[in-house]
Amino acid sequence: MSEERTLSYAEDPSQGDRSFAAPYLILALECERPLAMPARLSLAEVDRVVIGRADERSWLRVREGGSAVLRAGLVDGWMSIKHASFARTSSASGSGWVIRDEGSKNGTFVNGRQIKETRLSDGDVIDAGSTLLLFRDRVRRHMREPGDLDAGTAPAAHPAFITLNMELARALAPLSRLAPAGVSIVLDGESGTGKELTARAIHDLSGRTGPFVAINCGALPESLIEAELFGVRKGAYSGANQDRPGLVRTAHGGTLFLDEIADLPAGSQVKLLRVLQEEEVTPLGGTQPVAVDLRVVAASHRSLQELVDRGDFRGDLYARLAGAHLALPPLRQRREDIGLLVAVMLRRMLGRQAGAVRFERDAARALFLYAWPRNIRELEQTLEAAVALSSGRRIAPAHLPEAVRGRIAEGEQKARDELVQLLIQYGGNVSAVARAMGKARVQVRRWCRRYHIDPAAYRISTAPD
């Protein structure tokens, strides 16, 4: 790869709207420093990458022997000074990237299997020392978009908009301009993808002084929806013992977030449309409308446009709501952000105590290999339970739900089983096990800690009567 080709992408203004497919290496999660924010490093401009231990995290692009090289240093005591390298390769089947272990003390693993050298595929999870990296191949990148991005220093209109996923970053970018405009916005996405969090961020950026009011339209009985939304006058029906303003009026001057709006009954859709058109609401049992000033953000785990096309949602209401539209991707499609989300969640859960949390490497890897069918909400619940079970210290596979830890690679389990068999054979004598494996005694101790194995237990079990 020549420097001239790289520079033309970044410096030619006419190229700004063009895009190309680029590979990336994500510094995804540091097991001993999970609060350290992840980073995205572009491989499009280099032919080779070298990673190893350093006193501070850094990356530098240099020319070596006519090749463009990216040198990344990571603060990781489990990593060798020169731990692993990546190289661009071409073959009859196409170009790609190969990873090679450079004789590291603790080995290099791809999806849990120790390797000497192997070709990488999109989404591969790499263990180097106690750091997890994620390889992404052929990510769509616009010419003017930065290749490298450190999530800890990334400029963003709102913390909720920070992401290492380039497609999501492009989708979120217009929201900072739309927020102050008061445009109604529809958010699509599977349950748990962060729609309410995004709606709150829109409200924060809007400059509106009223409150953020959220309602789940699917969680209310149909008989109560209109009373909850539009309010009630005392005596409107049996049990209406006092005036209630309703959520529409409560959100006056602020933002009304209507989650799962597809579950809103047809009659209520008509009344909501009138409220939005006339900017006034009439409570149940009332005769005089009350003016309201609100911005609406609606959300659904189903596509509203598809529901409109099938006649299952009012097209005129959708047109009123969808001044802008954003589809939030499921977590399995933005695995670049798992480390970022973990860091944010730990800080929110534990505050100053979050710095004490550590991950066993196989537990951290399991987070990246799992598909997260319930998305960010499931990740948060998993992390909350793991923190509690580990007493806020070192999170191990045993602290994760069975469904999550079930993806721990067979290669890791095989290594653990082999270590156990040797401990049984040598009666828990770590020195003897180390000699049998051709490893240093301290390395066997490290593996015992990683796999939560107590050698003393095997000394007891094999002691003579």
Image (cartoon, rainbow, N blue to C red):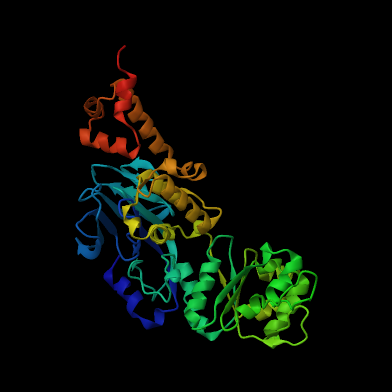
From the viewer's side, name the closer residue of 399 and 323: 399
Q: Which quarter shows the N terminus? A: bottom left
Q: Is residue 300 visible?
A: yes
Where residue 369 sits: x, y (%)? Answer: 46, 49
Residue sitting at the far top: 465
From the viewer's side, name the closer residue of 62 and 206: 206
| 426 over 42 or under it: above or below | above
Residue that appears at 38% across and 47% down: 391
Q: Which quarter of the picture shows residue 339?
A: bottom left
| 304 over 120 or under it: above or below | below
Residue sitting at the far front: 241
| 358 over 138 or under it: above or below | above
Q: Which quarter of the picture shows residue 108?
A: top left
Q: Is residue 316 visible?
A: no
Query: Left or right: 446 with respect to 205?
Result: left
Query: Left or right: 376 with respect to 431?
Result: right
Query: How many marks overall?
Result: 0
Q: Which quarter of the picture shows residue 40?
A: bottom left
Residue that appears at 27% across and 38% down: 446
Query: Left or right: 273 with respect to 124?
Result: right
| 320 over 91 or under it: above or below | below
Where residue 177 sits: x, y (%)? Answer: 48, 82
Q: Which quarter shows the C terminus? A: top left
Residue that appears at 52% across and 57% down: 377
